[in-house]
Amino acid sequence: MRVGRCWCGILVVSILIAVAAYEASATCVVAPSMSDPTAGLVIHLSPTCSPDEREAHALAGETVIDAIARGRRVDLAGVVIHGDLVFDRLPVELAAGLNEGDDGQRVVRAALSIRDSDVRGALWHRSSLNVLRFEGPVDFQGSRFREGVDLSRSVFKEKVDLSGAIFEKQAYFVRGQFIGETACRDTKFGPSTRFHQSTFQGPLDCTGALFDGMAELVGVTFERPVTFERSRFGRGTGFSGSHFKSRADFGEAIFSRETFFGFTVFENEVLFTGAQFLGSADFSSAEFKRGDDLGKARFDQPPILAQTKRLASEQSDGLLQTREGQYVLTLVLLVVAALLIAYLIKGK
């Protein structure tokens, strides 16, 4: 009986070990392949996958572009992508209503989602003659882009979400049209970020974003509310010539180097409460049609306000918040105190 019990115990232990080994091997779960191959390119890897397991399921950039060229949706999570994603490989289509200078368009017809992934090649569309049009939503949340990203001259019809993404090199969206909502919350942009002459028709939320290098948003039109609250701008920052048609919030943002808002138009309320300008801040010829809240920002150097159009009440408040204004106020208070002391001594 004891021998039988012993063998039973060994059998139970073996079963438990086998189950544990199976569970360990199943920690890297791949989403089941779609029964319909035309449904799209869908691969989801668990956060528990080891580097070797991710490499075993790695994709080539060409595979992703081929799926897009066939009009399939791309839904990737936790994957590794080797090689460049070159949107110039998509066929050019003729279309009505293109802007002057555009000969045609390349179209991404279905949703494009690359989340929490490691993109090791460049991602770009470099044609100066054609537009790249995204018909569905674009979701790059949490992904790391190790090489340059250039989606200039792109039209995004639905939501674009870059939240939590990391751009180790340049991120260019020059002359982009963002028709839906755009999010870049806690996004880390690299040495060069460009949105020159882009248009945001939907709201833009870049709360907590880090622009580690040059941030160039020159000549940009913002039609809906814009949020850069608690964002950090590590080097030169340019909003010159931009047009904010709705509310803009720069509350508690940090501008570490030179910042340019020259010739910028603010049609609605703009907030700078708690913002810090550690370098020069140039608001020359800017126009504030509503309250600008500059008086609640901190300037290490007096802001440049040459020919700036502001409401009178905001101008007077803002002067007291600058170092120069505070020095003047301190001097006035000292003079008043000295006169009061002199008056009291004379009275005795």
Image (tube, rainbow, N blue to C red):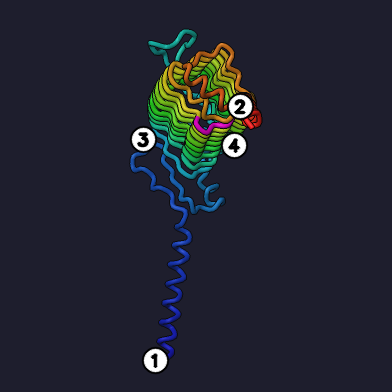
Instruction: Inspect the image, locate mark 3, and give the three-letter code of the amino acid beneath it.
Output: Thr
Q: Which mark is residue 146?
A: 4
Name the residue furthest top: 100
The three-letter amino acid code for the residue at tag 1 is Met
* Label 1 CA crowd tier, 10 Å (few <14, some 14–19, many 20+): few
Q: Which mark is residue 336?
A: 2
Q: Amino acid at mark 4?
A: Arg
Percent of width and height locating residue 302: 62, 23
Q: Badge 4, how many Cα within 10 Å: few under 14, some, many 20+?
A: some
Please state which amino acid type lies under the numbered disc 2. Answer: Val
The part of the chain drawn in magenta is: 273-277
What is the distance, in whole Å, between disc 2 and disc 4 at their CAs?
Answer: 61 Å
Please give the residue where the numbered disc 3 appears in the rendered image.
38
Q: Position of residue 309 (x, y in %)?
A: 51, 13
CB atoms of marks 4 and 3 within 8 Å: no
Query: Is any part of residue 92 visible from this angle?
Result: no
Describe the element under mark 1 as helix, strand or loop.
loop
Q: Residue at x 61, y 33 (%)?
A: 212
Specify whether 272 is left or right of 5. Answer: right
